[in-house]
Amino acid sequence: MNTILLIPTGEGVGLTSACLGMIYALDCKGINAGFLKPFSQIADTTVDRTTTLYRHLFHRRSVEPITYERLTQLIALGETDELLEEAVALHRQIAVDHDVIIVEGLVPNGQDHFASEINAALAQALDAQVVLVSTADLADPRKTAEKVDAHLRQFGGAASPRTTGVLFMRTKGLPDGTAEIPVTLDPSLRLDQQIAEFSLELQRYNRFMGTDELPIIGLVPFSNILSVPRSLDIAAIVEGTWLHQGEAKQRRILHTSLIASNIESELHKFIAGELIISASQRTDTLLAASLASSNGTPLAGLVLTEQAPPSDNVLEFCQSAIKQGLPILHTSLDTLETAQRLNRFGNEIPIDDIERAEQVTRFVSSHIDNNWLDQHTQNNLHPRLSPSAFRYELVQKAIAAKKRIVLPEGDEPRTVQAAVICQTRGIAQCILLAKPESVAEVAKARGIQLPADLQIIDPDTIRDQYIEPMVELRRGKLDALQAKAQLQDTVVLGTMMLALDQVDGLVSGAIHTTANTVRPAFQLIKTAPNYSLVSSIFFMLLPDEVCVYGDCAINPDPNAEQLAEIAIQSADSAKAFGLDPRIAMISYSTGTSGTGADVEKVAEATKIAQQRRPDLLIDGPLQYDAASVESVGRQKAPDSQVAGRANVFIFPDLNTGNTTYKAVQRAANVVSVGPMLQGLNKPVNDLSRGALVDDIVFTIALTAIQAKQQD
């Protein structure tokens, strides 16, 4: 068991972010990392912020810390040994289920004078490796070194075997552009050159710092983007009442602006991410915000101060903005007091702000030294394909594939943002089908910088060149006039580009239905030579492993032959994405315990699949619990190599598959990636119309990997 204790050098160093980032980095390596915060430092609370965020992010069990009242009571009584015994007991509870435990130490502050002493004793009691977490300023290496040095003395200095490194958070003085937010762990963001240069500066004041004796584990930049609250979070701070909450839970406050002068000289402030503060009687401000929102500019929100809120008649004029989700808040505080309170707003992550917590963990993990993690977490590990590891491998394989993916919904805002991320990170060469001026307008409204090499093609300039090839592909089924009409649909146009090998894959569905996305593929791309049908799978990112569910989107009631083919397709897809497939053919009966046409279909499909692919582990019929729960599998199918260990689940029909995937997704709060279509000559994938930007990015990555697999 490896235990790593993160000890902060002071308040506001980003300790929660450091803990979660290190756990995510380990998770991406397939290492099962637990979290423990032994002691609370907040009185009268039963909910710990870091522990709660850990549970939300990683869906794993943890324990609540020893209360602040209990902590201070035992210290006052001189019962430090008893306190540490209770901490060890909590540690042992977590150790049962995990390979590595990340422990959050006490924060030294003006109130808890005992913090440093207890941290040193805790490291001894847990036999933990110590990592100091501190802020850094590249312009002031002396102050940085002295702050770290003061805490090293508790452990015998920098050369002590107990201290294993320093993690610098919220680093100031780094060049612009070093604080990029990745979609998963991205080691290329690590600042090796800056670490080497800063190490030399630090060694003028402490010769061990930045050497093998006390390595710098990471130099994490300060990020304004990751420090921004949601619009939702400010209501309590300014004692406000929502006139319209809108998208306050989704929108972020990048900047705050007071509107004090003539509206004409203030219009430049109405930009994406801006929180506008204005007196309630300034009707012109409300109307300007409404107009900006109607034009597609996602303001963070509007705070109206003083006196009474605007009348219903004025708000009625703003219905267009309200429909666009503009958050509008009223407070009786004056404008200056409102602005001052917002300036004092802390940058801690609220326990329900999962989106920000996920971004922070990805950001911090990308700056942590991978080699250091390997050196300090190698004892008795049991690597697995965790959800984080799956997403990381997904992106890395897509980068290596170097494929061109066409996006027919080229001016849809989420699609534009996803294309920019993929282009910038090298996940895929994206091609947006849309008028360039329309894409530029979307980017400007949302503050997105379009990469110079992002290809944007105006459909009107290329449509005619696909009429004749489309008529040829669908010979006897349509003429030139009909082909031209169908090519008005950019999904059809993109599918023709794919059919003619001008791109490697297609992703659509953010605003189109599944039928709109897949019908052209069935007509123009058709099935691969070895297959007779197209099916789909979802990658289900369960807390401790990734499973494949199929078919959950395409075939309503496959016969035994088709079901066997779906199983084989799904197994091959699982292999392509790093899973060692163990395929369970799901039924309401296990083995020969039940009879009926439905069970017999699954039994026959199992035999066909086993005969066609003897290299695969396939078994069925199996009930879901017999397939997934080891104890049940041993009881119901003791001779099966799949029962209790399955990671590819093939459902007998669409009704069962679709219902099961949605039930697991919603009831267990599981992320699902898909549907991914399989069996086509070339990869086409469909999005949910509620897809987030990250969902689109990962679907593009999936498509790129499929294209590489079909080379």
Image (spheres, rainbow, N blue to C red):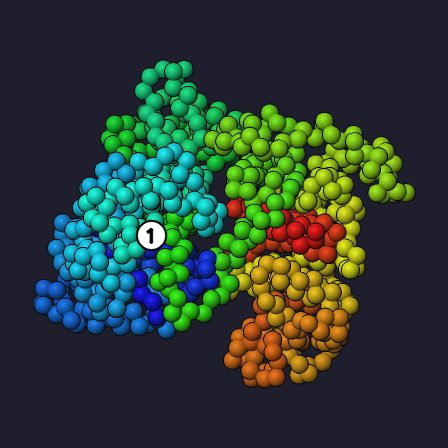
Q: Is residue 248 left or right of residue 453?
A: left
Query: Could you tell me if residue 483 is visible in this image?
Result: yes
- Name the residue located 33 percent from the left edge and 17 percent from the top edge: 261
- Residue 390 in the image: x percent, y percent? 52, 57
- Name the residue located 19 percent from the left edge and 45 percent from the top edge: 205
Q: Is residue 439 left or right of residue 86?
A: right
Q: Which residue is mark 1?
A: 217
- Residue 373 in the image: x percent, y percent? 38, 59
Q: Is residue 375 left or right of residue 628?
A: left
Residues 522 and 149: in front is 149
Q: Residues within 10 Å of mark 1 (few under 14, many from 20)?
A: many
Pick out the residue farthest to the right.
Answer: 476
Q: Secondary structure at mark 1?
A: strand
Q: Could you say which quadrant of the image residue 240 lies in?
A: top left
Residue 149 higher or lower than 284, as above or below: below
Count the labels in the image: 1
- Residue 453 in the image: x percent, y percent? 58, 32
Residues 204 and 657: in front is 204
- Residue 452 in the image: x percent, y percent? 55, 30
Q: Could you say which quadrant of the image residue 239 lies in?
A: top left
Residue 151 higher or lower than 415, as above or below: below
- Name the residue located 42 percent from the left edge and 20 percent from the top edge: 267
Q: Could you say which quadrant of the image residue 156 lies in?
A: bottom left
Q: Quadrant of the N terminus?
A: bottom left
- Name the residue located 34 percent from the left edge and 49 percent from the top edge: 218
Q: Amino acid at mark 1?
A: Ile
Query: Could you tell me if residue 133 is visible in this image?
Result: no
